[in-house]
Image (cartoon, helix red, strand yellow):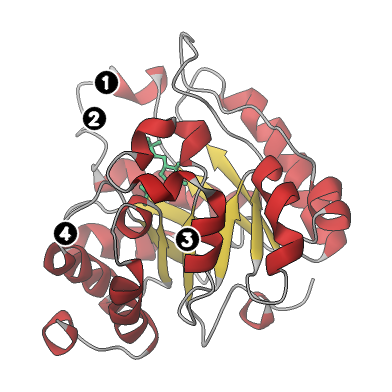
Amino acid sequence: MKEFDDSAIVRNGNSLIVAYDHGLEHGPTDFEPNPESADPRHVFEVAKHDAVTALAVQKGVAESYIDEYRDQVNLLVKLNGNSNLSSRDDYYSPKQCSVKYAVEELGAEAVGYTMYAGSDYEDQMWKEFREVQEQARKYGVPVVMWAYPRGNGIEGKSEYGGDTDPAVISYAARLGLETGADMVKCKYPGSREGWEQIEDAVGEMKTVMSGGSKRSDKDFLEDVHTTIEVGCNGLAVGRNVFQREDPEELLDKLEAVIFEGKSPENVL
Ligand code: FBP
């Protein structure tokens, strides 16, 4: 495949991915703070912002809207997903779309896959991911792993420090390197040292911070800037963008922090 740095979803080594798969992952409740965000067209319009290097959506949303936005939005098709309605004995995110379909039919520039390392279903997900990664190489598109350590294998252990435990997050990130991801998307572990631990584990592989629930511009930009300072390659963000009534304003600030290396104090 062509070098990841030359791919459409990277600019000057970094990425700002707007994630909009929440209708599947969390349901319409995530659209309540800003009801117009329930309309995918609204988020495609937001993703036209210069700062955004890709929009991550599930295949159905891509099918319905991408033709209209192809020239202005780089498509990242999220290949698997898991609703809040299901009741399983452990975390599993079933695959809904093949790489072939994403690339040939939808024109995806990149693909994404959630890996719940630590789940009892981990083996099944590795098998799916292996197919995804090898097909992605065949088609020359980068693979972003949503690296989410969750499940019975870790959550019951006495040494587990919760979902911001840097030891567990960096292990999950390392699995992305080991299995051939081009980029891992990780939850912020709560500190600069925590993100350094992630960077120490992943070699040259790219990392992006996962946005999380909506917080103030200041708090959000400080976390983003902290990660960028220690080697992170950007952000994959959903709620902090589409739950705002004026997402363009935040995207302007994120552009300055992620691509121009500015500090939050300089942009707020
Ligand atoms: P946010 O920035 O809103 O956290 O979105 C990133 C993301 O990974 C989405 O792609 C996904 O829908 C959601 O978070 C999953 O969050 P969680 O599994 O923590 O509920």
Q: Classify 10 Å Cα crowding around label 2: few (below 14), some (14-19), many (20 and above).
A: few
Marks 2, 4: nearer the viewer: 4
Separation of marks 1 and 3 at Cα, in angstroms:
34 Å
Q: Which residue is mark 2?
A: 160
Nearest-to-viewer mark from 4 and 1: 4
Q: Name the amino acid type tagged 3.
A: Val
Mark sitting on residue 157: 1
Q: Using the numbered discs, state the Cα–Cα distance from disc 3 to disc 4 in whole angstroms.
A: 23 Å
Front disc: 3 or 2: 3
Going from N to C along the chain, the mark reached first, 3 or 4, is 3
**Residue ID for mark 4:** 191
> Residue 18: which disc?
3
Going by the image, does 72 lie left or right of 39?
Answer: right
Inter-mark Cα distance, 4 to 1? 23 Å
Q: Residue at x 46, y 40 (%)?
A: 22
Give how far across and how far down residue 244 sits, in percent: 28, 58
Q: Quadrant of residue 27?
A: top left
